């Protein structure tokens, strides 16, 4: 557990530093498109992925960099994708909203809300049929529970007892609209009741609690007991996208959540039981900064895709 | 050896061979356990069991999404919807997931799945169970679209669709489902993207697919008997990829073309075919490429109204006569 927690801490810090730099690069207009950063929600991706085997599957959202890093995608190829470079994880074809690495079981960030619920359900169906023992986790925001896809997937996955975990990343906002204004129940875990699926509400900024809840869900899924709904309560420190004016929330609310920042909370825990002294902690942060710097250099120096290859990966229409 | 069996039975044979050959092939959809309207799934549940023949809730979105998820993790699902209109409930998953993933993720994965749906009019099925929506699918890069007319083709094309690494929309016209024809025994594929000349002729090319290829044969016989006009009938079989070579070779000889489908003329796939013919052969055409298709309204329930909206062989005959009568003005 101690070793796990140090590795978990390192991954959370790497996400934090990566996303901080991505935000800066976007504001400097070095990244095309637009980006949604994961800052503040690190405990969710890292805690859940720490409960998985390397060959398990995850599906992700438009805010997917954190999930990719937590599943093991290298920062260099991830950064190169954000630049639209040929060396990116999707060779520049996908960009920030579509990062994927199928070799690592990362079945893709997805720009369609709750789409991952359906894809993970299919991956679970496939794993169960093949008898591989793999599980599939779909990460989706609380906005996703109001999409039909969530409901169709929840019903089907439960009735067939598929090895799927519905990891609802409840960051309080569906784009710019507060959760209370759009969703008929305050405790989202109750949504699972209607499908006969266990629903658990978890402090999504406490990575140890996330890891525990995810481990229980994974064990149930792998053991043939079917899916679990995890309501992981967290908060988006930044706006919906980089550049969002954030007029829909108060400074008080943001400050209250900043005090529950998952990284200092984990660091306090690791300090209190002497797992990580301040020197080792500082090393983790400076190593992450170096790694991100390297990733940025790799992306900068990488070539763009050849325009002559624009039709690759698509069938010949004739 | 071949024998006479129905279109539905022919596709059932393709399913049986594919599932016996390759245990990655599963079938997932509405009401497949009981066998399907045309017997196209009969006996599969008994032979292959509920893990491979997955009866689904009436939840179209998850039928397609789960197929995509299974396809990108090593299976080759055949998804089935009873009526093509029901695919509208899964259009997000068809367009935004099935069609895009291979491209969007930089070619690191393929989506080998087939989406089967029945389309077209049959005995006053009315506006929500009668449509032909192939143009919606054909418009989207990344989807292949198949619409056979003959049982033998249906068997071979379904086998090819299941073996293909890209998502294939396989459209089965309801009028054809119970029609019989010569079907070879054994396992075989008809390659995707190849049209077939169902009847040779020198006067005018009729390009058709699905039920309109059958109406086209009847029209061709009538035109030969009553007007001494020899139609060359090109049955496309696959819409995407389009076999423009076979079409162009034919029109280059006949210098006249009529393009037919049961779908609406306006914005239909026939417009794409007509444009491609015109782009390639403008200087060789003796007449404008003419289209036959449904008139621009929804499919009515009342039988005389349905007939007034949806074309059959008479409309093809009329169009051919117009095209043959056309004389190009000297410049």
Image (spheres, coloured by chain):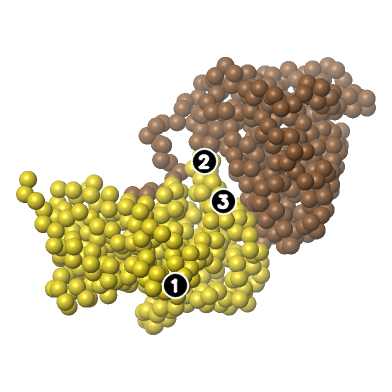
Is residue B208 depicted above or below A151 in this figure? below
- The residue that appears at 77% across and 23% down in the rendered structure is A250
The residue singled out by tag 3 in the image is B93
Quarter of the rendering containing residue B132: bottom left
- The residue that appears at 16% across and 77% down in the rendered structure is B226
Callout 1 secondary element? loop
Callout 2 secondary element? helix
How many C-alpha atoms fall within 10 Å of the one at disc 3: few (<14), some, or many (≥20)? many
- The residue that appears at 13% across and 73% down in the rendered structure is B228
Drawn side of residue B97 relative to residue A225, left or right: left
Callout 3 secondary element? helix
Quadrant of image for the N terminus of chain A: top right
Drawn side of residue A145 relative to residue A35, left or right: right
Q: Nearer the viewer, residue B330 or A63?
A: B330
The residue singled out by tag 2 in the image is B104
The residue singled out by tag 1 in the image is B302
Q: Nearer the viewer, residue A284 or B291?
A: B291
Q: Position of residue A138 (x, y in %)?
A: 70, 46
Compute the Cα span from label 2 to label 3.
14 Å
Front tag of 2 and 1: 1
Colour assignment, chain A: brown
Q: Position of residue B93 (x, y in %)?
A: 56, 51
Chain on which label 2 sits: B
Q: Are marks 2 and 3 on the same chain?
A: yes
Front tag of 3 and 1: 1
């Amino acid at each position: 557990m101690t070793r796990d927690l140090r590795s978990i801490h390192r991954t959370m810090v790497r996400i934090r530093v990566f996303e901080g730099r991505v935000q800066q690069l976007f504001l400097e207009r070095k990244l095309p498109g637009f980006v949604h950063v994961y800052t503040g929600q690190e405990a969710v991706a890292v805690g859940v992925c720490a409960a998985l085997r390397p060959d398990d599957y995850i599906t992700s959202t438009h805010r997917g960099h954190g999930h990719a890093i937590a599943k093991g995608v290298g920062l260099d190829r991830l950064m190169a994708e954000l630049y639209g470079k040929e060396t990116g994880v999707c060779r520049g074809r996908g960009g920030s909203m579509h990062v994927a690495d199928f070799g690592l079981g990362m079945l893709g960030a997805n720009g369609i809300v709750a789409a991952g619920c359906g894809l993970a359900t299919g991956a679970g169906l496939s794993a169960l049929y093949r008898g591989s023992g793999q599980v599939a986790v779909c990460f989706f925001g609380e906005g996703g529970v109001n999409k039909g896809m969530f409901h169709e997937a929840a019903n089907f996955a439960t009735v067939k007892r598929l090895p799927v975990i519905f990891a609802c990343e409840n960051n309080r906002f569906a784009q710019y609209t507060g959760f209370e204004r759009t969703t008929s129940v305050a405790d989202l875990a109750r949504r699972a009741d209607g499908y006969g699926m266990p629903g658990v509400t978890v402090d999504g900024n406490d990575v140890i609690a996330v890891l525990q809840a995810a481990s229980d869900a994974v064990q149930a899924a792998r053991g043939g007991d079917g899916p679990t709904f995890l309501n992981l309560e967290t908060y988006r420190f930044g706006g919906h996208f980089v550049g969002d004016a954030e007029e829909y929330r108060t400074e008080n609310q943001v400050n209250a959540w900043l005090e529950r920042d998952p990284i200092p909370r984990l660091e306090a825990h690791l300090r209190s039981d002497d797992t990580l002294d301040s020197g080792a902690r500082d090393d983790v942060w400076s190593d992450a900064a170096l790694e991100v710097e390297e990733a940025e250099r790799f992306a900068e120096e990488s070539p763009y895709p050849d325009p002559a290859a624009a039709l690759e990966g698509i069938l010949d229409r004739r | 050896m071949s024998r006479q069996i129905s279109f539905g039975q022919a596709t059932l044979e393709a399913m049986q061979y594919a599932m016996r050959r390759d245990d990655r092939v599963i079938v997932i959809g509405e009401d497949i356990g009981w066998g399907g309207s045309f017997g196209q799934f009969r006996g599969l549940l008994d032979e292959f069991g509920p893990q491979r023949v997955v009866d689904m809730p009436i939840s179209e979105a998850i039928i397609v999404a789960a197929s995509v998820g299974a396809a990108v993790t090593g299976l080759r699902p055949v998804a089935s919807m009873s009526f093509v209109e029901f695919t509208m409930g899964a259009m997000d998953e068809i367009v935004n997931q099935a069609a895009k993933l291979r491209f969007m993720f930089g070619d690191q994965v393929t989506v080998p799945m087939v989406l089967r749906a029945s389309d077209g009019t049959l005995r006053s099925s009315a506006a929500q169970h009668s449509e032909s929506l192939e143009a919606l699918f054909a418009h989207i890069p990344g989807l292949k679209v198949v619409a056979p007319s003959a049982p033998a083709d249906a068997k071979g094309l379904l086998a090819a669709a299941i073996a293909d690494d890209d998502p294939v929309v396989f459209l089965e016209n309801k009028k054809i489902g119970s029609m019989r024809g010569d079907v070879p025994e054994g396992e075989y594929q008809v390659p995707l993207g190849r049209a077939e000349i169902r009847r040779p002729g020198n006067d005018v090319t009729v390009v058709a697919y699905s039920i309109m290829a059958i109406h086209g044969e009847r029209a061709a016989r009538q035109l030969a008997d009553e007007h001494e006009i020899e139609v060359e009938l090109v049955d496309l079989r696959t819409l995407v990829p389009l076999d423009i070579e076979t079409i162009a070779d034919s029109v280059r000889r006949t210098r006249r073309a009529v393009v037919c489908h049961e779908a609406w003329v306006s914005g239909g796939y026939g417009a794409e075919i007509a444009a491609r013919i015109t782009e390639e052969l403008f200087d060789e055409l003796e007449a404008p490429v003419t289209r036959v298709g449904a008139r621009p309204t929804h499919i009515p329930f009342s039988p005389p109204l349905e007939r007034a909206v949806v074309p059959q062989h008479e409309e093809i005959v009329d169009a051919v006569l117009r095209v043959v009568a056309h004389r190009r003005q000297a410049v």
